[in-house]
Image: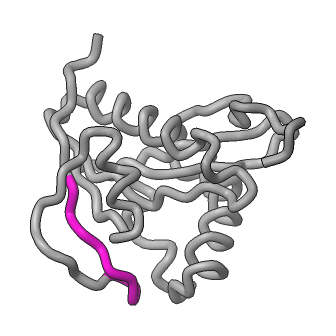
Amino acid sequence: MSASAPLDPVASLRIADWPEAQPLVMPLRLAVFVDEQGVPPEIERDEYDPVSRHAIAVDASGAVIGTGRLLPDGHVGRMAVAAHARGRGVGAQVLAALLAEAAQRGFSRAVLHAQVAAEGFYARYGFRRSGGVFMEAGIGHIIMERPLDPPA
């Protein structure tokens, strides 16, 4: 991070339905999951996208730098942050927005399939491991969950 980089790269963050989110978040998801991590492109988009709520984090230039989704059953997934924005709180803000959305929708807990390498990130936000490692899209994952506070 350069000395001139802002501490908070997120200029705005909103939750949207798939018709609005798709053209905005898919380029980032493809860059992170398909290009960087080698997830097959045919499984990156799935039947849960149209029924999920999607977080869209945008920087001051209007570029999408973070995303994630909340499935109708309260699962959080497809968390992705642009490479140049990692380590600067974008993922934390996306996760917080999705957890707030889950609480607002009446869920008492949030569940996610975390990549093993991201376990520490999610643990910092109250998620605890539940079970062993399993493979998803060729990447080791674990189930993690945490209780949600009721909306204020």
Q: Nearer the viewer, residue 65 or 71?
A: 65
Does the magenta stretch mainly form a helix, a strand or a loop? strand
Image location of residue 92, percent across then percent down:
49, 40
Q: Is residue 117 left or right of residue 80?
A: left
Image location of residue 131, percent across then percent down:
10, 68
User: Bounds of the magenta span?
Assistant: 136-144
What kind of colouring is applied to the model shown? Answer: one colour
Image location of residue 120, percent across then percent down:
35, 55
Q: Quadrant of residue 124?
A: top left
Report the residue at 69% width, 61% height from top. Answer: 83
Vertical side of 41 occupied by 72: above or below? above
Q: Is residue 152 left or right of residue 60?
A: left
Report the residue at 68% width, 58% height from top. Answer: 82
Q: Is residue 151 magenta?
A: no
Report the residue at 23% width, 44% height from top. Answer: 110
Q: Is residue 142 magenta?
A: yes
Image location of residue 51, percent across then percent down:
38, 53
